[in-house]
Image: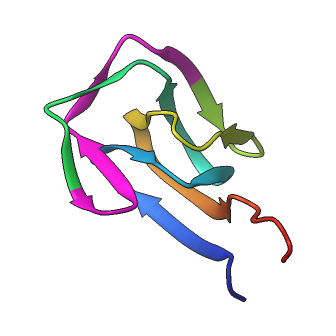
Amino acid sequence: MAPYNVNLEHRVMVATANIHDHEAELFYVIDGGGTMVTGGKLVNPTRPNTENQSGTAIEGGTSRKLVKGDFIMVPEGVAHWVSAIDGSLTMMSLHLPRATAAK
């Protein structure tokens, strides 16, 4: 329900690194495993739309091993990238837009 967006992601290969300018993202690992890098700088950055940035990888940052049952919260404006997948990785991701002041 707006303004929230929930996705189910099944990955068998590494995709792009991302930064969401105006929303945090919460990941829950449903099955499989891999490695997520957070922080650092995007490599070869592009802007596919007005709300997001993408890159081919992340330079620097912190790597974390992900396994079934893990949660990881990525604040808005922070680069994040699944840099390795151990066979396959199935995650739920919940996009959490920045709260706006009531008028």
Magenta segment boundaries in residue numbering: 48-64
Quadrant of image for the N terminus? bottom right
Where 1 sits versus 68, above or below?
A: below
Quadrant of image for the C terminus? bottom right
Q: Is residue 12 visible?
A: no
Q: Which residue is rendered at x = 37% and y = 44% of the image?
A: 18
Q: Residue 23 in magenta?
A: no
Q: Residue furthest bottom?
A: 1
Q: Choose between 32 and 97: the one closer to the eye.
A: 97
On screen, residue 99 versus residue 57, left or right, reads right
Q: Position of residue 57 (x, y in %)?
A: 25, 30
Q: Which residue is rendered at x = 63% and y = 74% of the image?
A: 6
Q: Position of residue 83 (x, y in %)?
A: 36, 31
Q: Residue furthest front?
A: 103
Q: Choose between 89 and 8: the one closer to the eye.
A: 8
Q: Residue 63 in magenta?
A: yes
Where 30 sits versus 8, above or below?
A: above
Q: Position of residue 66 (x, y in %)?
A: 61, 33
Q: Which residue is rendered at x = 77% and y = 45% of the image?
A: 69
Query: How many marks overall?
Result: 0
Q: Position of residue 74 (x, y in %)?
A: 63, 39
Q: Which residue is rendered at x = 22% and y = 60% of the image?
A: 48
Q: Choose between 13 and 58: the one closer to the eye.
A: 58
Q: Residue furthest left?
A: 44
Q: Residue furthest right?
A: 102
Where 79 sits versus 88, above or below?
A: above
Q: Is residue 20 visible?
A: yes
